[in-house]
């Protein structure tokens, strides 16, 4: 799944699924774990370039839905795709110096993060803060210390806006803000670590972040993978926020995800959208498959008086080649097959098979034949003969290895 | 059971690999030979049952016990003593011992009994509250549509549970996963059987 390609889609659609968001978050976390300094630098430089672009209103509108969608570097990717950064601006930014650039990037990450977490109300504050990035950046360049206080100012703004929200949302927002603050701290430190290229520090900070995630109890489901990772579920705008409904929603989304797979499997399900209709189609399909199995087994029983569907028999009879080309994976290659177990039987098999098979090898119908299959099949037969002490008729065979000839030592 | 493992499994199983078909064919032939050796003269119906049985067991064992339905299928088959031999031979003694240990016949029967008891109790309760529910339904017509939808879904998932082997013990999400897997394996089984049937038909026609 291309992360960059997925996120614009996620941002633009207002009802993102919880699982998609969670996956985006996980991927972002994984990304963060790899201290790819170049990657991050380029991201931040793009980011800086972007925020000086005038076309911010459209970007602001993109931050709709009030949902914890992407994280900030991921956002940067999205924004880079929608608006191509001006290289001149980028060079301008790089002049300021590495650390400053990173800090400036972090600075702009701040408002973006808050905008994501707090919804539409924040759009106004975004436009306010982002409309003067050059000035801010310059300020940051001159006084690097101001980065933190500005962050605190923004956090005040956030708390003010959350005061306007409904009571239900406030609870969730507060918890998330705590998380945001923790994450932001982690990010800051992480950036410094990247700038200093400290591998150990990065892992430390990533551990911190994970711990922050752990302590945040929103909806702790079972752990996934090795990290103690909780599925953080965020209530959507205008929906209930108690844990039961959140759990219900996650469960429902899981089910719908699996239903989508089933839609691909079961033919003719593309039109049907409801769960009941889908289940109906699935039931019909499973029933039809089971009936097919019954019918085919009846057919096979009727065709053959004994239960001996030996493939060599089929080949020996020089049956239609077109059918065997579809059978495809069954082939006999007499040359070079080492059958060490039961020499008598082997020779018998080999001799008898070689004659008719050559005719098949000449024909061009065997297109996709894995050569290992025949060896396996031979071995299967050999094992059977060996275990059950069956004596093969040494004469060239005309009929099949009849069940009546089998003497099985049980 | 995480969603990532499920997606991984889906992506690998989306097109049934030929290795699965090979495994299935191998085991099926083994089963058929065992059946053929046991009973020399069988009627058509007996043969058909034997064919189907060995096919089912081969399909289930080709999954190597990674799915619930395969284990349930094998367990159901080994409940009847007549089939046990086939199962053993198809699976190989070690595997069959492992599987029969994991899902011993006794406990599965006990589980089924428990579930039946619980369900019957639920039915009794439902019947008692029936008249009350009907009144409530009449009063809130807006609720009834969702209720009806839920009932439909529940009915259908019941039917699906009866179709998929071992389905009664699963919850909805795992039921859908197992159905997916089961459908794929059934498809492969039908494919192989069809090809074999065509081949034998042509052979007999050419005679």
Image: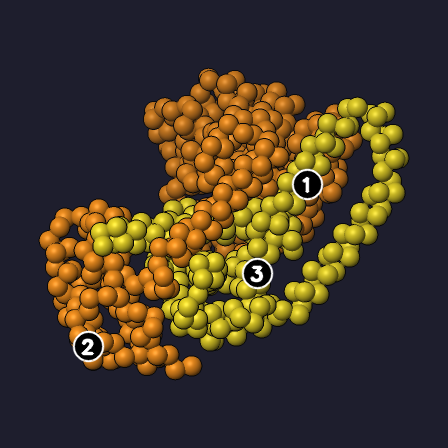
Q: Secondary structure at mark 2?
A: loop
Task: Choose between B58 and A246: the one closer to the eye.
Answer: B58
Image colour assigned to chain A = orange
> For residue A5, which numbered disc appears in the image?
none
Q: Secondary structure at mark 1?
A: helix
Please state, as top left, top right, bottom left or bottom right, where the N terminus of chain B lies in the image.
bottom right
Tell me where residue A338 sits by quadrant.
bottom left
In this rendering, position of residue A92 left or right of residue A51 = left
Per the model, the C-alpha gap separating discs 2 and 1 is 61 Å
Q: Chain of mark 1?
A: B
Work out whether residue B126 can be spotted. Answer: yes
Assess disc 2: are there few (<14), some (14-19) or many (≥20) residues with their C-alpha within 10 Å of its C-alpha: some
Comparing marks 3 and 2, which lies closer to the viewer? 2
| Rendered view: A215 above or below B133 | below
Please state, as top left, top right, bottom left or bottom right, where the C terminus of chain B lies in the image.
bottom left
> For residue B72, which numbered disc appears in the image?
3
In this rendering, position of residue A235 left or right of residue A381 = right
Image colour assigned to chain B = yellow
Q: Chain of mark 2?
A: A
Picture residue at 61% right of the left edge, 53% below the top: B167
Tell me where residue B39 sits by quadrant.
bottom left
Q: Secondary structure at mark 3?
A: helix
Task: Choose between A328 and B198: the one closer to the eye.
Answer: B198
> For residue B154, which numbered disc appears in the image?
1
Could you tell which of marks 1 and 3 lies nearer the N-terminus? 3
Assess disc 1: are there few (<14), some (14-19) or many (≥20) residues with their C-alpha within 10 Å of its C-alpha: some
> For residue A394, which numbered disc appears in the image?
2
| Rendered view: B143 above or below A202 | above
Q: Could you confirm whether marks 2 and 1 are on the same chain?
A: no
In this rendering, position of residue A129 left or right of residue A401 = right
Q: Position of residue A403 (x, y in %)?
A: 34, 70
Q: Chain of mark 3?
A: B
């Amino acid at each position: 799944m291309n992360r960059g390609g997925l996120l614009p889609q996620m941002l633009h659609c207002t009802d993102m699924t919880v699982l998609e968001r969670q996956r985006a978050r996980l991927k972002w976390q994984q990304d963060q774990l790899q201290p790819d300094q170049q990657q991050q630098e380029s991201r931040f430089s793009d980011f800086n370039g972007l925020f000086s672009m005038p076309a911010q209103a459209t970007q602001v509108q993109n931050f709709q839905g009030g949902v914890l969608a992407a994280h900030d570097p991921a956002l940067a990717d999205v924004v880079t795709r929608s608006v191509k950064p001006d290289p001149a601006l980028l060079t301008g930014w790089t002049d300021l110096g590495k650390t400053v650039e990173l800090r400036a990037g972090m600075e702009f990450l701040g408002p973006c993060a808050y905008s994501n977490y707090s919804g539409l109300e924040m759009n106004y504050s975004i436009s306010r803060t982002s409309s003067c990035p050059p000035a801010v950046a310059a300020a940051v360049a001159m006084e690097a210390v101001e980065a933190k206080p500005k962050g605190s100012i923004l956090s005040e703004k956030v708390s003010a806006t959350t005061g306007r929200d409904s009571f239900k949302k406030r609870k969730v927002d507060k918890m998330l803000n705590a998380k945001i603050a923790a994450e932001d701290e982690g990010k800051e430190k992480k950036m410094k670590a990247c700038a200093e290229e400290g591998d150990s520090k990065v892992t430390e900070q990533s551990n911190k972040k994970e711990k922050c995630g752990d302590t945040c109890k929103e909806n702790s489901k079972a752990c996934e993978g090795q990290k103690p990772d909780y599925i953080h579920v965020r209530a959507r705008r205008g929906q209930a926020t108690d844990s039961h409904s959140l759990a219900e929603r996650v469960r429902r989304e899981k089910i719908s995800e699996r239903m989508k797979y089933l839609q691909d499997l079961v033919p003719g399900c593309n039109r049907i959208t409801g769960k009941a209709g889908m289940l109906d189609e699935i039931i019909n399909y499973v029933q039809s498959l089971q009936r097919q199995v019954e019918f085919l087994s009846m057919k096979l029983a009727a065709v053959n008086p004994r239960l001996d569907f030996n493939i060599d028999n089929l080949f020996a009879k020089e049956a239609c080649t077109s059918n065997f080309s579809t059978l495809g994976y069954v082939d006999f290659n007499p040359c070079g097959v080492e059958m060490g177990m039961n020499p008598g039987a082997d020779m018998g098999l080999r001799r008898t098979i070689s004659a008719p098979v050559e005719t098949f090898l000449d024909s061009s119908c065997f297109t996709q034949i894995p050569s290992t299959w025949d060896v396996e099949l031979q071995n299967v037969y050999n094992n059977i003969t060996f275990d059950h002490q069956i004596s093969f008729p040494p004469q060239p065979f005309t009929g099949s290895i009849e069940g009546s000839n089998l003497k099985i030592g049980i | 059971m995480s969603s990532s493992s499920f997606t991984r499994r889906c992506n690998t199983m989306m097109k049934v690999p030929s290795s699965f078909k090979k495994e299935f064919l191998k085991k099926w032939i083994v089963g058929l030979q065992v059946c053929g050796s046991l009973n020399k003269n069988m009627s058509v119906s007996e043969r058909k049952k034997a064919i189907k049985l060995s096919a089912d067991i081969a399909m289930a064992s080709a999954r190597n016990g990674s799915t619930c339905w395969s284990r349930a299928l094998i367990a159901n088959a080994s409940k009847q003593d007549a089939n046990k031999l086939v199962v053993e031979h198809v699976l190989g003694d070690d595997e069959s011992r492992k599987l029969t240990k994991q899902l011993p016949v006794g406990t599965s029967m006990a589980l089924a009994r428990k579930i039946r008891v619980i369900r019957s109790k639920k039915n009794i309760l439902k019947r008692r509250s029936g008249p009350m529910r009907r009144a409530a339904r009449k009063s809130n017509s807006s609720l009834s549509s969702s209720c009806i939808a839920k009932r439909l879904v529940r009915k259908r998932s019941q039917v699906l549970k009866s179709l998929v082997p071992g389905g009664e013990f699963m919850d909805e999400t795992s039921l859908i996963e197992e159905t997916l897997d089961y459908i794929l394996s059934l498809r492969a089984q039908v494919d192989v059987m069809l090809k074999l049937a065509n081949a034998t038909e042509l052979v007999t026609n050419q005679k």
